[in-house]
Amino acid sequence: MADLAERGADHGTPTMRRPAEPGFSAAAIDTPALVVDLDAMEANIARMAREAAALSMRLRAHAKTHKCTAIARAQVAAGAVGVAVQKVGEAEAMVDGGIRDVLVTNQIIAPAKLDRLAALARRATLGLCVDSGEGAVRASTAATAAGVTLDVMIEIDVGQARCGVRPGAEALALARQVAGLPGLRFAGLQAYHGGIQHLATPAERAAAVAAFTQPTRDTADALSAAGLAPKTVGGAGTGSFRHEAAAGVWNEIQPGSYVLMDADYGGLDTGDEAPFAHALYLATTVISRRDGGHAVLDAGHKAASIDCGPPVPVWPPGARATSLNDEHTVLALPGGHELPLGAPCWLIPGHVDPTVNLHDWLVAVRGLELKDGRPVAGTVEAVWRVDARGAYS
Ligand SMILES: *Cc1c(COP(=O)(O)O)cnc(C)c1O
């Protein structure tokens, strides 16, 4: 069995040190590390591709979840039309990684960033959202200077009160302006509501989508009547995509979290549908313990986000993180359970996107089996760079 000691001198710099190499057993992965259960991830990718096809939706996987081109390529190979991202830096990583259709589902305003986006459009189909005439003019200026065409989605605010023009007349006026600007191609409407994704029940999520379906439909109809029929009406995430698909207005869904999942999404009521499978773990090791079910792990805020709750130990049932510090997580174990010093402890991250962004590597394991929260089978098949880690700009 290969292990770290056999790897030799080439550990890279301390920050870039890989936690494992292909061929390692899952039990030999250095901690803390993010581990992908490849079989579960591939099943999630295949299932979403199947569901999108059955719903007659184009699937544009949101890559802000994983920031990893190896995963994006697997999603595209399974039928996604391309990826969505939030940042120009993420778009650059995706295009460098071979993705040929990228939509930035965000407002890009700084001229220097728009120049980078326009440069990318020489190598791939590139789109962005706009919600202002000023933003559209800036995008047009960058595109014409680079001699490229950028796809533009008019973002409408469907209730999140974040970015977006108001549905209706404002959206129509902006679409007219975009259609008249050189270097831009009016591509459609972006109608995404992030705030509803984690509503607890399918009925609540359905009602939330219903509340913004009519304004979205009216806007699309007004555009069509003006000769600007939107080629794409996009939006939807892992929590809501079935409801947008059922509404008959959207034709592109942009779910992200489904591919790896997290404790926040795993806790939702999904009604008749089984949830997507947990495919991401934070592997840690017990570095201190006390009697009475107190164990301390070798990972804290610098390995796991807590904005949607702390990471959740896979085992024992009822174990929970009671506090996190920079490099520690303290666990309270339910009665009678103890974790010995040096024991592996695998956890499900609370929120996938910001957790992945804390890591340089994703360790992809084939044939993973966990028993009592520790790996008893599985072999590292690949160690993927989180290519767009830290790509905030
Ligand atoms: C984050 C995001 C998504 C994906 O949401 P999930 O809940 O992770 O599936 C889709 N579209 C946009 C615009 C987003 O920002």
Image (cartoon, rainbow, N blue to C red):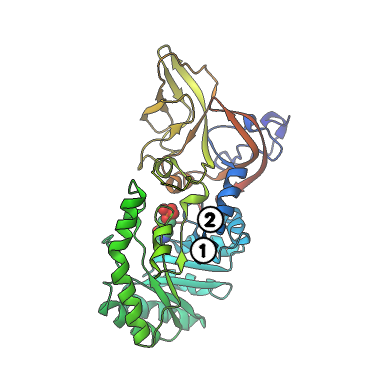
Q: Is residue 52 left or right of residue 139?
A: right
Gap in angstroms between the C-alphas marked 2 and 1? 8 Å
Q: Hey, which quadrant is residue 132 in on the image?
A: bottom left
Residue 385 seen anywhere in this rendered image of the structure: no
The percent coordinates of residue 146 (x first, y second) are 50, 80
Residue type beneath disc 2: Met
Residue at image position (52%, 16%) is 340
Residue at (39, 63) in percent of width and height: 244
Which numbered tag is attached to residue 104? Answer: none
Q: Callout 1 environment at 10 Å: few (<14), some (14 to 19), or many (20+)?
A: many
The amino acid beneath tag 1 is Leu
Task: Write down the residue under mark 1.
Answer: 59
Of residue 273 and residue 181, the one placed in the foreground of this image is 273
Residue 147 image offset from top left, x and y in percent:
52, 83
Q: Are marks 2 and 1 in contact (CB under 8 Å)?
A: yes
Q: Position of residue 159 (x, y in %)?
A: 27, 62
Closest to the observer: 391 or 308? 308
Q: Residues within 10 Å of mark 2 (few under 14, many from 20)?
A: many
Is residue 334 positioned above or below 88 on the image? above
